[in-house]
Amino acid sequence: MSPGAALTASRRVPAPPPRGWARRAKRHRMVIAAFCTLVGVACITLLPFYWMFSSSLRTMENMFSIPIQWIPDPLNWQSYVLAWQAQDFTRYFLNSGFVAVAITLSNLLLCSLAGYSLTKFHFRGRGLMFILILSTMMLPLEVTMVPLFLIIKQLDWANSYQGLIVPFLVDGFGVFLMRQYMLSIPSDLIDSARIDGASELRIFWMIVLPLCKPALVALAVFTFREAWDMYIWPLIIITKDSLRTLPLGISLFMSSYGTSWDQLMAIAVLGTLPMILLFFFLQRAFIQGIAATGLKE
């Protein structure tokens, strides 16, 4: 080989990688970046919950120590026992559970019935009715609290389960959620059942509800969480200790004489367990129900 040919060969630029490989590498980098971002957001979101759990295991002497003891030493499990014995928390848990389950079941039934009528029945004013239902979502509880309290007082439902449950038997968001999901159910399926002689109640119960399982799970999780965490309304209408819900019971730990922060955090951890377990077992159907509500008519 001549010297000129050797010099040319040494200066030869290597061939660029295939274009498909470059696209795959770029896609992999984007996936890794998205994964790292989601992990960071998840850590930021979970940090307050871990701090709450960590604080429940600290002693009062180490509660506000600097630096923060993320892993308490020693572990103070006694705070859970003392917190549970400090008040009648068994009663508070049962009250919150009963109210949350009753409100959830009523919303599942009534909101699904409303969604079925708004999607599978054609009547004058259907669109206007749906708009009016949506408009109720724009009014926070603080706006309707005074007239609602006056109604409950006139009905003599203060200090009763009726006063806690009846005002929340149906919710505009639940109607919206069920309507949006039921839009994906073919109307031909409903018409075929009607031709076969099935009643509307049978169609709703045997055909529509089984197809709406993901939306029902999503609605159940949303409604149960709202009812379980409800604080302002029970604070207004409940004065009897036997009817207090869990959020009201937790507030008893805070007083002008001092706050037992370890016990407060311990009972707060116990209060979050039902929601964590509910979402853990229903998360797949919950995500399916939320994803399907974006379907349009």
Image (cartoon, rainbow, N blue to C red):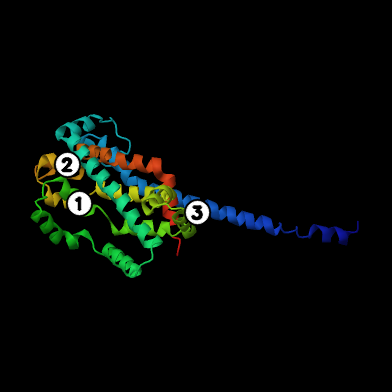
Task: Label 1: state its secondary structure.
Answer: helix
Whether tag 2 and tag 3 are in contact, CB under 8 A, the answer is no
* Res. 262 image quadrant: top left
Q: What is the spatial separation of the Cα atoms under label 1 and label 2, in whole angstroms?
A: 22 Å
Q: Between 23 and 124, which is closer to the camera in this rendering?
A: 124
Task: Label 2: state its secondary structure.
Answer: helix
Is residue 202 among the parts visible in the rendering?
yes
What number of labels is visible?
3
Q: Is residue 35 left or right of residue 48?
A: right
What percent of the width, then of the height, locates residue 264?
A: 20, 40
The type of residue carrying mark 2 is Gly
Q: Which mark is residue 166?
A: 1
Whether tag 3 and tag 1 are in contact, CB under 8 A, the answer is no
Badge 2, how many Cα within 10 Å: few under 14, some, many 20+? some
Badge 1, how many Cα within 10 Å: few under 14, some, many 20+? some
Of callouts 3 and 1, which one flags the residue occurring earlier in the amino acid sequence?
3
Q: Which residue is tagged 2?
A: 249
Quick one: quadrant of the C terminus?
bottom left
Q: Which residue is tagged 3?
A: 34
Badge 3, how many Cα within 10 Å: few under 14, some, many 20+? few
Of callouts 2 and 3, which one flags the residue occurring earlier in the amino acid sequence?
3
